[in-house]
Image (cartoon, rainbow, N blue to C red):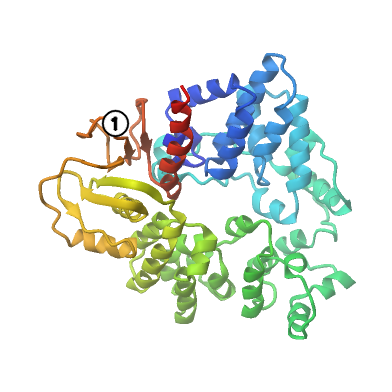
Amino acid sequence: MLARVAYEDAFFAWPRPARERYVSLLRRADPAWAPGFLRWLRTATPMRYPALVGAAAFVAGRLERGEHGVSRQVITSVLHRADDPGHLLAHWAAAHGPSLPKPVKRAVADAVTHLYDEPALVAYDDGGHHFEVGFVQGDLPRYGGIGTPRPLRFGEVIRLVHPRARDREQGDLFRHALARRHGKVRTIPATLPLVRSWAGLPRIADPLSRALSPERLLVGQAAGTAIDLATAVGPMQVVAGLRSGSGQPPPGRLLARLRHAGASSHAGTLVAALPVSDLVADPSARARLEPLIPHLPLTLLLAHLRRFDAAGIGFETAMAVAARIADPAEVRASGLGPLRFAAAWGAVDSRRWEPALAAGARHSLGAVPRLGGRTLVVVEPGSDARIVFGIALAQRCDDADLAVLGGGRFPLDPDESPLHALIRWHSTDLCGTPDRPTGHDRVVLVTEQFDEAPDVPAGVPLYVWETRRHSGYEPEVAGRVFRGLGDASFRIIPWWEEFVADDQNEY
């Protein structure tokens, strides 16, 4: 599992033997161990879809053996996002047949009652996968696209599991989801104002809607009235207004307050819903969308810097974006690591983003776990991602030596931005005779393709990152060999030394 953390949701890109072995192990896993493992996999790692597949395999194996208990709880433990129930049911039908056992049906029904609301419907009920596929993104054509079933739409999930609505508004939501899935929508209830706004329909006037209007919110805030932005209006309402083009863009003050309030529990839905591509494809959309740009999630800002340049956003907007990218508090709250900033650094042509990206990368080092002891990090050149990974990893070691594969050592500054160090790496003469590791507690090799182990003293753990993206069939290599790079990769050594090494020491 740890070998493919960088694949994120791309379970379909694992080599077939690895997928089959993973499913086989979960089908016969110890019920005292598997629930905790699957919960950890879903919550502590970016491997969301593998967690759903693993939970389905575990439950299927227990049901085949006639074992009862635990199954419903395990399914519930991996359903955290509103599109998870649709993914799990689609996978179950493809892998285990259309019949839904009671534990699966009841667990999914519980999750639907908890997860389905208006923002979720708007963002995820579109038949899309909404996957993060990590470093294999560029190889999707070679895999034939995303090779997993499309998630079931909200209406299909509701029809299959018959969830119990928690209130009248959710009951209206369930009926609307069923109607829209079968093309039978005639009206949208007044209890679904966001869905109406998203469809371009006017909001039905009532005392509540007048009380929650943006103008009244701003006036109330100015007057010191205690108005809870988190429950009154959320980012999705703002996006819906901008998307439909109705009225004037909301004031910048309201957008900023919405962001600082952390209003929506569906922060990711804002990313999924905003048509950022319209900035370039439709120049007329810039007037509607540009006011929202400085307040987007940091992940989206980094992903679309090049698009912002192509759209020609104004100087003030660009400066506001740069200020957020370089803000230590923003970076720490986002949880992003250095590789996200390195990817944005490599994607943009304009130099105006470089100071902000370098500052953000420096602040993001706090998301990289510290490693005790003495570490030798050896990096094969030729890829900025490998170099930044090696630099950042070495910077977070208590004591580290950083060297180029087959060459000399690179002088390390623990307080330097990894992106500034990247520039220095390319301008430093790294020729020389490599030193044999001596006195190190671990050796880390970051390379394009792992062919043979370097000369490492006996008893010194070797961790290898292999960054080739597509190789067709990947042979299974025993030991600490990990494929691909992502920010989650920084956590693998602490995970390994905490869990795997401890388990091995018990025997």
Query: Image point 74% across, 48% down: which residue?
Result: 116
Q: Which residue reaches farthest left?
A: 432
Q: Which residue reaches farthest top?
A: 65
Q: Nearer the viewer, residue 437 or 56?
A: 437
For badge 1, the amino acid type reads: Gly
* Residue 307 % position (x, y): 44, 65
Query: Image point 54% across, 22% down: which residue?
Result: 25
Is 474 on the left or on the right of 324, as rendered? left
Query: Image point 84% across, 67% down: which residue?
Result: 204
| Circle 1 SS class | loop
Is 231 on the left or on the right of 260, as rendered? right
Instruction: State the image quarter where residue 92 is shown.
Output: top right
* Residue 245 % position (x, y): 65, 71
Is residue 252 positioned above or below 308 on the image?
Answer: below
Q: Is residue 182 visible?
A: no
Is residue 207 positioned above or below 268 on the image?
Answer: below
Q: Nearer the viewer, residue 97 or 230?
A: 230
Instruction: State the image quarter where residue 131 is shown.
Output: top right
Q: Which residue reaches farthest bottom?
A: 223
Q: Residues within 10 Å of mark 1 (few under 14, many from 20)?
A: few
Is residue 430 positioned above or below 133 on the image?
Answer: below
**Residue receiving disc 1:** 459
* Residue 355 % position (x, y): 36, 72
Instruction: State the image quarter where residue 54 is shown.
Output: top right
* Residue 386 % position (x, y): 30, 49
Q: Nearer the viewer, residue 97 or 485?
A: 485
Q: Is residue 42 visible?
A: yes
Query: Image point 33% across, 66% down: which residue?
Result: 349
